Image (cartoon, rainbow, N blue to C red):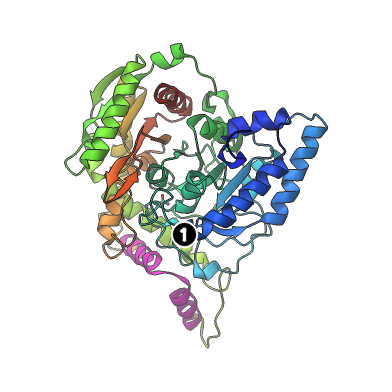
Amino acid sequence: MSSPLHFLTLKRFHEGLLNKEFSALEMAQEHFTYIESRDPEIGAYLALHRDEAMRQAEAADLAVAQDKEMSALAGAPLAIKDNILIEGTRTTSAAQILKDYIANYDASVITKLKKAGAVFLGKTNMDEFAMGSSTENSSFQKTKNPHSTAHVPGGSSGGSAAAVAAHMAVASLGSDTGGSIRQPAAFCGVVGLKPTYGSVSRSGLMAMASSLDQIGPFAKTVEDAAILYNEIKGYDPLDATSDPRADADVSKALLNPTLGQIKKLRVGIPEEYFIDGLDPRVRTKVEEAIGVLKSLGVEVKPVSLPHTKYALSCYYIVMPAEVSSNLERFDGIRYGTRHPADTLLELYKKDRESGFGPETKRRILLGTFVLSSGYYDAYYAKAQKVRRLIAQDFDEAFKQVDVLVTPVTPTPAFRIGEKMSDPLSMYLSDIFTIPVNLAGLPAVSIPAKGFVDADGASLPVGFQLIGRRWGEADILGLGQYYEKAVQ
Ligand code: GLN
């Protein structure tokens, strides 16, 4: 074996495991050894589950030895964002108020992955309650970009992206409410998929904004992301917004699409995503990627999504409204650390004052304001109408094309500390990812070939493929062909 085990893709690991070239235990051990040497510098993990991981790896090896039928995930060492519950383990959403919270059930995605025989290496760092774009809002630690430790890994799933980029997990799970999978994937040079709303169960995902949140995979290749997505998707009665179509073949990602299937795809370039604020280095990389898609023989044409310019404002009304109501449960009584107090109000104040960081408080205040009587119609009700218009733009575009290509972020990864004192400029880093969540669509962030020079560092850039609802097969199929073409 020429390269170390922890460099393997999910696909290659699975083949090698079945061929008995190595064991799942060796794979897990090698990951932990590497994490020990590399993670002190990166800070991707909040907790490691070594003992349990070893047991899971042994179980996978036993199944191989007994020639049992194996899932594509058997023995695969994964990292899990710390807002996804794993029974019996600390799950904090990187928030002080949950620093001692032990999950008492498995998220539905974890149940599925346990059945598939996956190995959970540990929990990854994130922005507190998934609010942020740099992982700097974690109340525990900062995660660094594996390509340059002076730069952020993106957020909010920065730990999950960095773990895969630094080969400290073969793949990982994150959550995406406004870009939290795709943006860190782009900053760290890995693949990140935000699936169709309703395709992956949210049961056991700590809710940020329930109408926008989706769990999805980070992986080293598009094919690996497709493998992991196929395992975690599916209808779940425990999630009221889960969609029965998630069990149908229509929602399956194709693992070996033919060139004939790919060539049939019509690709649209939305002009509103190639604006003046787009960094020229990012623009060039995305244009190069479009050139590669053209060379595959797909038809490429311009389209328009005219309400794009309202998406960020719309999101910053809908999202905090839902945040303010979802975070009510963290009151020190039902959840969270309880402080001694004489009255109920004093109790709430003490628990929430010390338990939430500044960004969480900012959004609770914003959300409470936009929902308050007298302002509800002016803000929340209006934002819901705008949300509909944004979704309709996509419906119109998907009458002409099957896939849209856009940048993921306006710039490459920024420096640690650069945007912390300016929330608005931080919010702007999600301008190209947010419309997809508002419309409930699937989208994947794929590393464009090569790197760009960014203040002394060489950093990756991602491009985004957006599909129609249940169009995972289209975007992941085209993505797999892109990868083959640039290899
Ligand atoms: N960065 C965006 C925000 O701060 C998106 C967060 C997310 O997708 N969880 O809201």
Residue most extreme to the left: 276
Q: Residue at x 55, y 62 (%)?
A: 92
Instruction: Name the element at disc 1.
Output: helix
In the visual, does 79 lie left or right of 421?
Answer: right
Tell me if I can see residue 382 in this picture. Answer: no
Instruction: Please state the horizontal and vertical placement of residue 287, each as a whole percent of the image.
Output: 26, 29
Q: Residues within 10 Å of mark 1 (few under 14, many from 20)?
A: many
Identify which amino acid the numbered label 1 is placed on.
Phe
Tell me which corner region of the image, top left, top right, bottom left or bottom right, holds residue 133: bottom left
Is 256 left or right of 290, judged from the image as shown? Answer: right
Relative to 266, residue 142 above or below: below
Give x and y (percent) for residue 60. Answer: 74, 39
Q: Is residue 365 above or below residue 408?
A: below
For the image, the number of numbered tags is: 1
Residue for badge 1:
129
Q: Quadrant of residue 99?
A: bottom right
22 or 214, which is in the foreground? 22
Segment tinted magenta in the rendering: 345-371
> Most extreme residue toward the right, as rendered?
66
Locate the N terminus and report the quarter of the image it occupies: top right
Dominant SS type (magenta):
helix
Q: Is residue 188 visible?
A: yes
Q: Position of residue 161 (x, y in %)?
A: 47, 47
